[in-house]
Structure formats: C-alpha cells, structure tokens
Image (cartoon, rainbow, N blue to C red):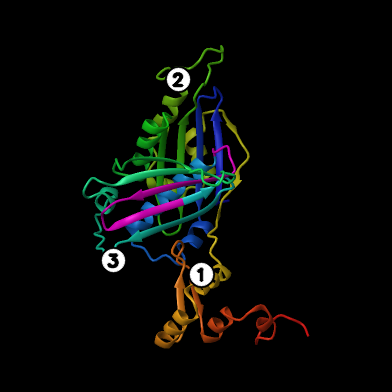
Amino acid sequence: MTDILKKYLTTDHSTRLQTLQLSESWQTGLAHQHLPPQVVSLLGELSAAAVLLAGNIKFDGSIVLQLQGNGPVRLIMVECTSALALRATAHLREDAAIPNSSSLQTLLNPDGQGRFTVLLDHKDRPEGTPAYQGIVPLEGDSVAQALEHYMRHSEQLETRLWLAADTQHCTGLLLQRMPGATAPDGQPIMPGDDTSWSHCQTIADTLKPAELLSDSPDTLMHKLFWEDDLLAFPEQSVRWHCPCTRERVASMLRTLGQTEIQSILAEQNHVHIDCNFCGKPYEFDPIDCASLFLDESDQQHAPGSDSIH
C-alpha cells in the first residue's frame, strides 16, 4: 500500500524512524504542473520531507517548506497539514533554461542569496498573530542536506533524511534523535552515547535513491532494519489537496468587474485561469461569464439553473 506514512521508534526511545512512498497523491499533484525533471525531483523531495515532518507536529495546522532564490527556479513551496493533506508548487523564471546537470544550488542559489524557510501555521492562530517562521541560508547540495542544516542549527534537533522523487513517486526516510531519551537504567542518553542513533544512521547510509523509489515502505524497513526490534505506530494516509475550486475562481473573477471580463472575452472569447498553486485549469465561456454578474433572482431563471418551478 502506498500514500501512507509509517512511523517507528527504537526500543530505547532514542531514535524516531519514518518512511513513506507517495504515488497516487503525487501524480495527482503533478497532473497540471509541467516541470522539467530536475525540478520535479526537487519538488518531490521537498514534498516527502514536508510529510515526514508534518507527521510529528502536535497542533492542528500545517507546515510549509519553501526554497527561494535568484536562479532559474525562483520558488519551490510545499504545504502539508497535520492531517497529511499535501500540496506543492514550483515557479520558474520566464524563459528559464534548466540544464540537464542542474543541482539545487545552480537552480535556486547561484548568487549565494537563496533562503530556506520553515513556517508553522496553527489553524487556531489568533488574528493578527504571525505564524512561526524560521529562515536560514540555503546550504547543502540537496533538499535533504538543506533541511538537515535547518533542523540542526534552528531547531537543535539532530535529523537525517534520505529523499528521492520522479514523476511516479516521491519517497523518503527520516531519522531523528529524540530529545530527552533515557537508557534502560533510567539515565539520560547523552549526544554521542546513544548506540541506536549511530546504528540506524550507519544502516540508512547504505540506502540508494533507486531503492527508495522502487521499494514499498514495508520492504524498505525490512531490508534495512530486519535485525532490529522497532516499536511501530499506526500508519497515516496522505492525500493531495489544493483548495482551489471553480467557485473560488468565479469569486475572484467577479472582483475584476464586468467591464474587465467583457474586455477579455472580446479578445479571447473565453476566460482561462490556472490555479497559481497546483496549475489546475478553469475555463469560463461567455455564458459562464455572464452568469457571474447575475443577481440571485436572475440566477434562479438562468439557463441551466437547478431551481425547480
């Protein structure tokens, strides 16, 4: 089974392990986004990382990961809620050239001014109160390294990530050293003294991206940790969710005003809108556009109305 997050803990409670492989939700998310393979890979890796981290947040809300810079790719952004609803997008500069040998740094950070941002947004955050936001320089040769750098220096939480993505799957394995872990004798486990953390890293470092993409989470965990007695937690389903709807697009078009809409129709005979997050297209023909500006009583008598007389 894919599109699930699986979570484990070593028996000494010193190391958290999580793995996932997204297929259906990932392909749904890419359906209307036409991106070069190198950008798909970065977007998928950041998506997998967001899900892995969102599985641990203790509030009702979302985590947003954002890579931003002055390269051919100006922005990659992923949001995942605490319920593991995911959406992701990438924005390229107009006429950007994406060489086959592109890397994270050449695509986003050629001038060294790139930024990596983590935002935690509580659903019940009081109006006017900003969401928590952490920003660090975009360092590392991969999404995994950039996030590990952030977690180590901004959150003081030792984290290791192995990520891979293509057009069919985005996948990941997370290891995290648990703060406040204690040994069986009740003594606190100090950094450098916990053999489980070192042991899990040594094993996971043998993992190849091809294995992440081809093996199911169950197969992967068995292959890597078959000798270890891990505590397993209930798995969680992941789904793609972008809140764009035809109704929301219609409301936006109304704000443009009837004169502006008529001008677009005169030029193009239709209004075409793509969601600026997921790329889903919405088409409004002249009849659709006319109905935008009917008042409620007019809509009850408009062609195609669902009202019963």
The amino acid marked with disc number 2 is Asp
N-terminal-most mark, 3 or 1: 3
Indicate left or right for 155 with 16 as reference: left
| Marker disc for residue 49 | none
N-terminal-most mark, 1 or 2: 2
Placement of the C terminus among the 4 image quadrants: bottom right
User: What is the distance, in whole Å, between disc 2 and disc 3 at their CAs?
Assistant: 50 Å
Q: Residues within 10 Å of mark 1 (few under 14, many from 20)?
A: few
**Residue carrying label 1:** 252
N-terminal-most mark, 2 or 3: 3
The amino acid marked with disc number 3 is Glu
Of circles 1 and 2, the one toward us is 1
Q: Residue at x 65, y 86 (%)?
A: 302
**Residue carrying label 2:** 194
Q: Which span of residues is magenta-colored?
A: 56-78
Q: Residues within 10 Å of mark 2 (few under 14, many from 20)?
A: some
Q: Position of residue 91 (x, y in %)?
A: 36, 60
Residue 69 belongs to magenta span: yes
Looking at the image, residue 191 lies above or below residue 98: above
Q: Secondary structure at mark 3?
A: loop
- Main SS category, magenta section: strand
**Residue carrying label 3:** 94
Of circles 3 and 1, the one toward us is 1
Q: Position of residue 290 (x, y in %)?
A: 55, 84
Q: Are marks 1 and 2 in contact (CB under 8 Å)?
A: no
The amino acid marked with disc number 1 is Met
User: What is the distance, in whole Å, between disc 1 and disc 2 at their CAs?
Assistant: 55 Å
Q: Residue at x 49, y 33 (%)?
A: 225
